[in-house]
Amino acid sequence: MTRQMHLGLFLLGTGSHVAGWRMPGAVDSFQDFSAIAEIARTAERGCFDLIFIGDNLYADPAAHPSYTLRLEPLTLLAALAPLTRHIGLGATVSTTYSDPFTVARAFASLDHISGGRAAWNAVTTASPATAANFGTVHPDHARRYERAGEFLDVVAGLWDGWADDAIVADRDSGLYIDPGKLRALGHEGPFFKVKGPLNIGRSPQGRPVVLQAGGSEAGQDLAARTADVVFSVVQDLDEARAAYASLKARLPAHGRRPEEVSVLPGVMPVVGRTEREAFDKLAQLQGFVGNENALALLSDRLGQDMSAYDLDGPVPDVALPDSYHSFARVMLSKARRDGMTLRDLYNLTAAARGHWVLCGSAETVADTLQHWFETGAADGFNVMPPYFHDGFTDFVDLVVPLLQERGLFRRDYRGPMLRHHLGLDRPPR
């Protein structure tokens, strides 16, 4: 079969643009379940591989609205499961502020509820502000990734604790579960001590799909060993190709083939029927952005207060922060490469929180995505609409048909489970 791209939807109810909710008629709450359900149905109509819901564990009124006011992701996805039939359902859960048994059980449950469509985005949690809600001190970058590696191993072991045929339910003999088909984990490591097995049978996919988004060396190493899908932060085609090649080159050391891990760069598409219409939309969005919230986002991403610097001067030479490492690296690299001012950089941050903004006609957007896909920069894209619903339906109704006409994207789903969409085998126990 000819290689086709994968598409994920990064679902923020008020849109990925920090002021997307201010567009006329836009969704203005990430607590509006009816609106979220409509978005999910639109994504499934567009044959997207999955919906992905990020998460954070603290509230900051100066931050993006959907980061501060949102429904708990796993609860939300469980509610969406019966309203959809095919699309994958992915959510972020932290390896720093959670425990493996609870996470393994929750995603196995979602996989059963959805008929095999669950995906876990395993993140280490970048923001130090989270620690105050858990009565602890935020671990440094290296420590978070050490913990994450063990966390993922424990979760995988728990998912594999039940054989597919462990549930006998024989009314004649009275045997319900064959104890010989259960396997205790008996894990004891530096961070966790977990006996197992889970109190839930093997999930429809064998294991839910694992997503990751780390771009640091530690993040790439962990993704190469454990991830099925990697969300990447990009701004430049050559850098995206280099990061793509770097990740794929790490896979053989873990006995994995390049096609076993899909790399989906994040992209915020602003789509019009003409170039002018698209750029008018982007200008309208940018017109809603004030200095205060843009600078707050930029300071958060760079890990330090940027308000003391001259907005119209060059971007200062700041050290990479311990938090949001890959975001900061990508943005600072672009700023230095393009000779940007600090105002240029915070405008970029406000537009898509540091992600790639692709603005143009449907043909321009499709051409660009095709070029990245065919030249070794991506296996598909994590689409981050600037606002809902029109900012997403523009992509589904105008860009997706062009990709389908070119044979680059599916016209229908291959099967009922997320692993079918991604072309992944069901893992053996």
Image (tube, rainbow, N blue to C red):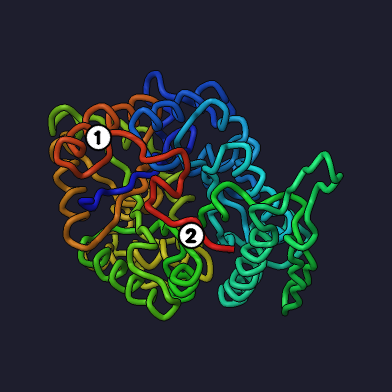
Q: Tell me the tag on residue 344.
A: none
Are circles 1 and 2 on residues that touch, CB within 8 Å?
Answer: no
The image shows residue 134 at horizontal and vertical percentages of 75, 57
- For the point 73% across and 54% down, the residue is 102
Tell me if residue 104 comes above or below residue 286 in the rendering.
below
Q: Is residue 374 left or right of residue 185?
A: left
Q: Among all residues in the image, which is located at the extreme front?
A: 172
Out of 161 and 234, give the one closest to the viewer: 161
- What is the quadrant of the C terminus in the image? bottom right
Q: Residues within 10 Å of mark 2 (few under 14, many from 20)?
A: many
Tell me if residue 322 comes above or below residue 204 in the rendering.
below
Which residue is denoted by mark 1 in the rendering?
400
- For the point 76% across and 67% down, the residue is 184
User: The disc labelled 2 sits on which kind of residue?
Assistant: Gln
Secondary structure of the residue carrying tag 1 is: helix
Secondary structure of the residue carrying tag 2 is: strand
- For the point 51% across and 53% down, the residue is 209
Q: Residues within 10 Å of mark 1 (few under 14, many from 20)?
A: many
User: The disc labelled 1 sits on which kind of residue?
Assistant: Val
- For the point 26% across and 27% down, the residue is 397
> Can residue 338 be seen?
no
> Can residue 133 be seen?
yes
Q: Is residue 389 left or right of residue 77?
A: left
Q: Earlier in the sequence, mark 1 or mark 2?
A: 2
Out of 202 and 94, give the one closest to the viewer: 202
The image shows residue 343 at horizontal and vertical percentages of 32, 52
Q: Toward which corner of the image does residue 145 lie, by quadrant?
A: bottom right
The image shows residue 349 at horizontal and vertical percentages of 37, 50
Out of 418 and 62, give the one closest to the viewer: 418
Q: Is residue 192 left or right of residue 396?
A: right
Which residue is denoted by mark 2 in the rendering?
212
